[in-house]
Image (cartoon, rainbow, N blue to C red):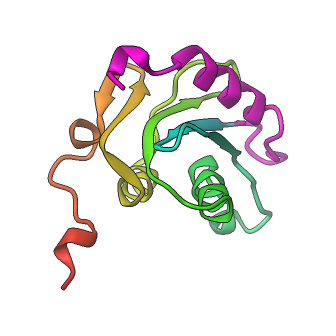
């Protein structure tokens, strides 16, 4: 599958739907994400806040948990949207989380267009660095 074959419209629509389920009573900043998995599935996640702010779960955490719970796999393509449905860049922590579960050819829809995982997290530390 080439970058042009990725169903970006489906991914962003799924991310927008996930964003509507976000639990954000404190920040009022809903986030939704969706990913195309290497077996063809599309999974999603949303952010879930907590009164103890440090315990808030980013949407990417929910997505990775859904990936593990649904049989695993590797992320081929990823989209993240804000409360208005616009592309949103994952924070550094979430980029690292996505890196762990990426397919070698993973691409992301970013605020500056489609980028590879290596472009958004250059020189990343990952499982390949552990003995």
Foreground of the two, 69 or 28: 69
The residue shown at (69%, 28%) is 14
Q: Is residue 44 left or right of residue 113?
A: right
Foreground of the two, 19 or 43: 43
The residue shown at (51%, 44%) is 39
The residue shown at (18%, 85%) is 131
Work out whether residue 113 can be spotted: no
Please state, as top left, top right, bottom left or bottom right, where the N terminus lies in the image.
Answer: top left
Total number of numbered discs in the rendering:
0
In the rendered view, would you say 131 is above or below 122? below
Residues shaded magenta = 1-30
Residue 68 drawn at (x, y percent):
60, 64
Quarter of the image where one finds residue 21: top right
The residue shown at (81%, 32%) is 20
Residue 104 belongs to the span the image colors magenta: no
Q: Is residue 20 left or right of residue 94?
A: right
Residue 81 drawn at (x, y percent):
60, 28
In the rendered view, would you say 26 is above or below 108? below
Residue 8 belongs to the span the image colors magenta: yes
Residue 128 drawn at (x, y percent):
20, 70
Residue 74 drawn at (x, y percent):
44, 51
Work out whether residue 107 can be spotted: yes
Q: Is residue 80 left or right of residue 123?
A: right
């Amino acid at each position: 599958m080439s970058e042009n074959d990725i169903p970006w419209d489906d991914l962003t629509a799924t991310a927008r739907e996930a964003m509507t389920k976000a639990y954000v009573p404190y920040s009022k900043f809903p986030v939704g994400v969706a990913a195309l998995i290497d077996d063809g599935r599309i999974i999603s996640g949303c952010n879930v806040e907590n009164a103890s702010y440090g315990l808030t779960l980013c949407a990417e955490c929910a997505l990775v948990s859904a990936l593990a719970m649904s049989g695993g796999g590797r992320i081929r393509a990823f989209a993240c949207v804000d409360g208005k449905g616009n592309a949103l860049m994952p924070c550094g922590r979430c980029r690292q989380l996505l890196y762990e579960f990426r397919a070698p050819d993973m691409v992301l829809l970013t605020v500056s267009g489609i980028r590879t995982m290596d472009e958004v997290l250059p020189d990343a530390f990952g499982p390949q660095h552990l003995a």
